[in-house]
Amino acid sequence: MADSVRTPDLGQLADLAGLGLFQVDAERNVVAVSAEMERITGFTPEEVLGRSCLSLVRCPECLRGCGVFERGSVRNARLTLYRKDGSEIEVLKSGRTLTDETGAVRGAVETIRLVDEEAGGGCAAVPPELDAMLRGLGRMYVAADAELRAVSLSPGLADLLGRSTDELVGVPLEELFGIELFGPAGTLARAVLDGERREGCLAELHRPDGSRVPVSLTVGPVPAEPGCSRAEVAAVVMLRLEQPEAPDTPGHIYHGILARSPAMQQIFRLVELLRGNDAAVLIGGESGTGKELVARAIHETSHRSERPFVAVNCAAIPAQLMESELFGHVRGAFTGAVRDRPGRFEAADGGTLFLDEVGDLPLELQGKLLRAIQQRAFERVGENRTRTVDVRVIAATNKDLGRAVAEGRFRDDLYYRLRVIPLTVPPLRRRREDISLLLQHFLARIGQRHGRALRLSPGAIRVLLAYDWPGNVRELENVMEYAITVCEGQTIHVGDLPPELHPGPERPGADLPPRSVDHPGPDRDEPGGAYPAHRFAGPGEPAAAPTTTTPFEHLSPTAAAEARAVLAALEETRFRRAEAAELLGISRTTLWRKMREYGL
């Protein structure tokens, strides 16, 4: 009885691990089915127990022969199954045969997990064959009592820590995973006491040699069963090994800007050309594209890099205070001026002054700014003394300053003084190659801040790649913040994304026509025109009239969204189908079928 008490129920552990599990006898009849297996396939235990495993796992490959019984084991075999309702799903199947003392096969235990779900979790105190199989998936477990002390654990975990299993039995979980998670006030400790499940929590295992192993944890309570004391096994912690956080891909990060698209590489080349140039730069581009990051890169690559970079948002400061903000004031200059105060020009002396949203600068102040730039001289408000500074000015705007000049809202002489070197940061929809790179960057950075290790499901990736991102990189970052906050598991699915991203007629921009498959040529409104010909119209933005009939106009909104996601993945990978299929989380055969279906 002691062994049964100290071994958590296999089905519960499989469910906690997010794995569908079933067991068959020597005749391949089903003898056990986990709740997760029922959820995945749609078949209840009553419908399949005692019947052939083919009644549960309806797979054409299995009809031709069982790899588990033929080879003794399989690992991550990719199969297509048919659920009870007839729908088709792709899964990864692993399994091992079970043998008796004489070596005769007495059955097999097998697991499946959806390809569209990166399930978290670990393995159970189970037969060694299953433990070895699940260790191959990078999963382990610790079973704990009501006082959160280890009562049993995966042998692989003991090996990883360089200690014996007996040594680790009785060790408090806070010693293994940290007091922040399992101490008296730990977040996971409280969850267990409240009978709640938590997934995707970041932790580190400390090895005897001083090295640390990053892991993500899934914790769940184990209900007491008749004849077993809840004090023996009250909770199970599943571990998934995580790769140590690597720096961003070399060549894809430039002075804090993460990008690999030709459009942004052209921007980087222009910044390099400005190394020895002290001329004023005017950066254009939509909100959220990263204009200030580009300005900082210009500063950091110049001879002024050791001096201050001072940024001022011209749209965020009231017009009556802007002059004082730029040039400073002296005591008594106006009500509230109780002491002398230097302005931003003085603060940036020797360095760079960045004027963000310069198009919002009041017209009456533009002449004073022009003099300060031309003569490098100004007076504080309420003072007659002329002060001189050595400042380089970089300005940015999301407005059409040329039109503002024509309409008399912006001085033409100031416009041309600022626009010595014009530079435009392209919107995210015109550099789609950067989307997946930015997604992984924000997923890791925001997840680290939340103490969670999460992944994106292929379905979520497809939606994120197909979206037009009217708010650009800033919107993408906010979407990832939202998804990580609301996601309850270890994998972010489509339902965890903000409503406006969900495919369907309710998604803004979902009914806008995509471009023609005939590439119309590069855009010419950015440096070098180095952008993909494929351009998606954003919400509220008029879509360009296609030169030929759009290929998706006959599809439903959902199918059209999928077609656009497939097309975006193909373009991002330059139509390398194996890479596109991996990015979308589907097989190459499925990708090829969808390409034919959508005329791609």
Image: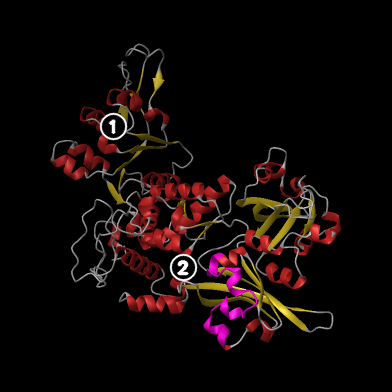
Residue name at image x 35 percent, y 11 percent:
332
User: Which kind of residue does numbered mark 2 sit on?
Assistant: Leu
Residue interval drawn in magenta: 39-63
Residue name at image x 68 percent, y 46 percent:
192
**Residue receiving disc 2:** 583
Tally of marks: 2
Task: Provide residue 509's location: percent of width, then percent of height.
Answer: 28, 56
Query: Which of the 4 image quadrants contains residue 99?
Result: bottom right
Task: Provide residue 391's location: percent of width, then percent of height.
Answer: 37, 35
> Residue 375 — which label?
1
Where 442 falls versus 98 (above or below)?
Answer: above
Instruction: First in sequence, mark 1 or 2: give its number.
Output: 1
Task: Provide residue 417's location: percent of width, then percent of height.
Answer: 24, 40
Where 191 falls versus 390 (above or below)?
Answer: below
Out of 487 and 454, give the one closest to the viewer.
Answer: 487
- Label 1 crowding class (10 Å Cα cut-off): few <14, some 14-19, many 20+? few
